[in-house]
Image (spheres, helix red, strand yellow):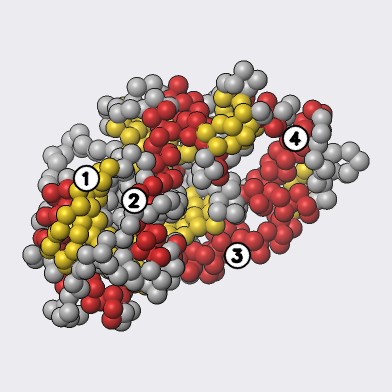
Amino acid sequence: MRELAVDFGTSNTVAALRTQGGPARLLLFDGWPVLPSAVLRGRDGTLVVGQEALRGARLDPARFEPHPKERIDDGEVLLGDAAVPVVSLIAAVLRRVAAEAPAPDRVVLTHPADWYSSRRAVLLEAAREAGWHGDVQLVAEPVAAATQAADVPPGQALAVFDMGGGTTDVAVLRRTGTGWDVLAEAGLPDFGGRDLDHLLLEHLGAELNRPNDAAGRRAARALAEDVRAGKEALSQYTQTDIPLPHPLPDAHLTRQELETLVEPALRRAVELLAKTVGTTPITAVYLVGGATRMPLVARLISQRIGLLPTIVDSPETSVALGALGPAPVIPQWTPIVPPPPSLPRSTPMPVPPPEPKQSTAAVVTAVGLVVLALGAVTVAALLRPDTVGTATPIASTPVSVPSSAPPEPAPAAFREDEQLIAFAGPAAAKADDCVNALGTNSQGDMYQARNHVRCRFEVDGVAYFANYLSSDDAQTCRQLNQEFVDLPDTRWLSEEPWTGGELTGKSHDIEAPSGNTVLWYADTNSLCAFFGAGTDHNPSMADVHQAWKTVVGA
């Protein structure tokens, strides 16, 4: 059994391989455990990646894309005189990884926790183009990072602060019996280690005009590398020297100078972490990503959160290593003892997971077309849609919303939203756990819902998630529905009356690579909901229907 995990990053890609359940090892590219994610289109149309792409960019930057991950929504990128599909750019990077680990039995690809299902679909399509046609799974990056936190017991939560080259992502996760639930996530798509490099470059007064010849491009590349190396050196030493181009004198820089320069920018990221954690009690903050090596990052988080962050040995590689999940451990000298029956029940997370198999069955139980969001829920955070296409017409069949109040008080996460509580019906009070998802880059935030509550249920050992949304704008539920329509290779199998759990209306059975979905809807558009399993499970339509009936006791 050969298992391959790939952390496709903004600036660099890292991959880890595990054979026969043994320890994972990092793959090496040109002797290094990190592969630049850069892609260059050669004059013959060939796509080259990594160091070779960086070298070629010095001669012809018009044929160069340094950060394909940032172009995930663009469809195509103009390189030289040809438009190249973004899928092909990503596939080129993955193909370079595949060359170092041929014929894996299982592939796990990581992605930001807030990637919409259409973005995850692009990543999966790139994996197929790279030659991986077997078992390919998705896992959210914070879930992969949290996998290495073996000292966090079930029921307790931690935060992951992931600062890479181009972005910063934060997430709050709760440990379950079998993995992690993503309680909240957020990100800064416009802030990462490169932005700190740029601040330092400006501070040194060494910015060059856009070079227009090969010599100028080589000088600009060398300057950028020297500045980055100087910044990284100050993570270990208190002072360093940075060579600057003539006629500027070389710069002498201290750690204190650098920290004073970048602290305002870093505080923005730390405040995002604090906001995302909110009132959730956490036991640890894990630092992930190469930019977190800067001592100031840990210090600011400690001051703001009140916890000293855990700094992993290799923050650049921890996501790839964690994506494979813990290796099975079989004691050699002591017998394997089955866990006591008092251990917590197993529960996968609400959206991006460790080794996800995308699948989220949507249950729109109400007014307004609703969409399942995410084909790739992994053990962790619920992903949301990002593209809006042509929505299917909204059904005119009325749906009766339960008129009686739930038999038990609704969870506090509903924040006394009476309309949403009545719409959710008796199921909400039976959830294992409910969290309010507003402010976490959820579907509710994306489509400007008034309220968004996410509830987790366990049915026969499988975690299912119901998301309830209320809105003052009918477009909220329509836009959710559009994401289903726009998912690649989606097939609408049926449209029939369906009744269960005091919800009556029409349903769509939707088959898609990202997961099978059942969609309920009504003819008013201010309330909606969706229901489905975590992506490490991909139940049949019949199983999803039955799970909902089990949840509500129908």
User: Given contact means CB atoms under 8 Å apart, are the residues at marks 2 and 1 in contact?
Assistant: no
* Label located before the other in sequence (4 or 2): 4
**Residue at mark 1:** 493
Q: Amino acid at mark 3?
A: Arg
* Residue ID at (41%, 71%): 473
Q: Earlier in the sequence, mark 3 or mark 4?
A: 4
CA separation in Å, label 3 and label 4: 29 Å
| Contact, mark 3 vs mark 4 (Cβ under 8 Å) | no
Is 534 displayed left or right of 69 in the figure?
left
Is residue 224 at least partly visible in the picture?
A: yes
Per the image, the residue denoted by label 2 is 484
In this view, the mark in front (4 or 1): 1
Q: Secondary structure at mark 1?
A: strand
Is 538 or 461 nearer to us in this picture?
538
Residue 152: tell me if it is visible.
Answer: no
Q: Position of residue 181 (x, y in %)?
A: 31, 57
Considering only vertical position in the picture, is 449 above or below 171? below
Q: Nearer the viewer, residue 147 or 398?
A: 398
